[in-house]
Amino acid sequence: MPHAIDPDEAQVIDRAVRILRTGDWNTHLFDQPTLVVYCVVVVAAVRYLAGAIAGQWTSLDLFQVGSVYGPTRIVAAALGILTVWLVYRLGEEIATRRVGLLAAAQLAVFPLHVSESHVARPDVPATALIVLTMWLGVRAAKAGTARAYGIAGVAAGCAAAAEYSGVAAIVAVAAMWLVRERRAPDRGRKAAALAAGAAAAFLVAMPFAVGDLPHFLDGVAGQLAAIARSPRDGAPWLHTRELSWLIAPWLLLAAVGAAVVTWRSRERGRWAPVLLMAAAYGYVVVTYPTGAARDALPIVPMLCLFAGAAAVELVRLSRRVPRWHTSWANRAAFLVVSLLVVAPLTLATVGSIRELRRPDTRTATAQWIKEAVPQGSRIVVETGGPTYLEDVPLRVIRTSALSDRPLGWYCEHADYLILSGPDTGSAAAYLNAGPTVFQITPTAQRAGPPIRVVKLHE
């Protein structure tokens, strides 16, 4: 903070603060749903009022965007913790208390879940809502009432309004409805309650899906077009190869657990929502990867449940050893197996947290700008570059990508261009617009995007 901020996180915060300042709840951009943005608006409003009480500002024009990140990230971390509890309850509901405990313990220290819970992006809220939907779906199947299915539908609608991929959550509830209600005389009423709850929640959280239908359809179409693009070479391993070698045995254990609960007919029905959700979401992630490991986050709780089931099965098999057929030996075996499962994940997470302490290319660029760029200069910064340079006496023009405007516009309105992406053909014209006065690339010791600063006017 405040320069090395993920572009997706910056977009969420910026859209929320723009709503706060303009009063226009229509983001006009639907590349992502709006539920998380609206929640950040509430957090930003509370932070603004708290700052006003402390005398930090007297109007929204003086409100500093960077001050929103702290409280918003606290909320994200709280949702990450809530997801751990939900995984425990789901595991207890479909299997046993031990499966729930071990699955929750894994998720609590899983590298991807921990790292994503540090930032204000839609991935963690969507994952929490997906797990909540599955848990409510299982409870609805046990209750067997239209009201319970309606509540589960509301959770599914909220999951879709947090992240478009969250629409897969309704698969979990539909699975329980098919397993438990296909012969019930009121199955139609329960299905209608499920669908109505999901639709109502989605429209409340995304009112401009109807109010601004053209932009909404364009946003969804853009996401679908990205998914439909031909996968790159080696795409099936895109996400798994980004994981530490410490997690490879865990993935195998999760696969064994999934096979065990699928093979056993008496457990297959209870595990149906988790199995179908993992299969549906896993297929999309593996077949049509979008390039970020966090896209696989919603499937992590399911894998934790599968790994927990496999570990508990190993403990059960240990009872066949005569000397281990006692309660204390069984508890000791569960403790040992749990430590063996959780320890590699913990080590991988500790390593990933250490990476956060290293200086970022964006931080280094921001420092150079403060020292080398004359005061009053006009600089154009892409979203992926150094963020929030308001404390520098410069005129900052922010844009999602330089390609959003023609080069002539920048030559007229800016003095420096800060490019924060690979040296591709689309960026060649901007790179050749003037001399490169600063350049930095990521290394094994320095994270961040490659950055070049081009001076337009001598």
Image (spheres, rainbow, N blue to C red):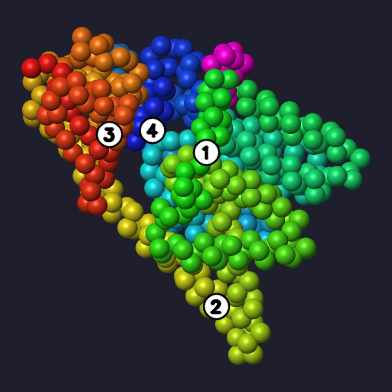
Residue 266 visible (yes or no): yes
Question: Which residue is rendered at x = 47% and y = 26% of the image?
Answer: 37
Rendered position, 261 above or below 55: below
Marks 4,2: beta carbons within 8 A:
no
Q: Describe residue 38's horizontal placement relative to residue 267 as left or right.
A: left
Residue mark closest to the camera, 1 vs 2 = 1
- Mark 1 or 3, nearer chain start: 1
Measure the alpha-carbon separation of dots 1 and 4: 27 Å
Q: Nearer the viewer, mark 1 or mark 4?
A: 1
Question: Viewed as shown, does residue 156 lie left or right of 2?
Answer: right
Q: CA distance from mark 4 to mark 3?
A: 24 Å
Task: Measure the alpha-carbon separation of dots 3 and 2.
Answer: 54 Å
Vertical comparison of 129 with 358: above or below: above
Q: Residue at x 39, y 48 (%)?
A: 115
Mark 1 and mark 4 lie on one chain; the one further toward the N terminus is 4
SS category of the residue bearing label 2 = helix
Residue pointed to by mark 2 = 333
Per the rendered image, the range of residues in magenta is 205-216
Name which residue type carries label 1. Answer: Ser
Q: Secondary structure at mark 1?
A: loop
Q: Which residue is mark 4?
A: 9
Viewer-closest of 291 and 182? 291
167 sits to left or right of 344:
right
Is 433 in the magenta? no
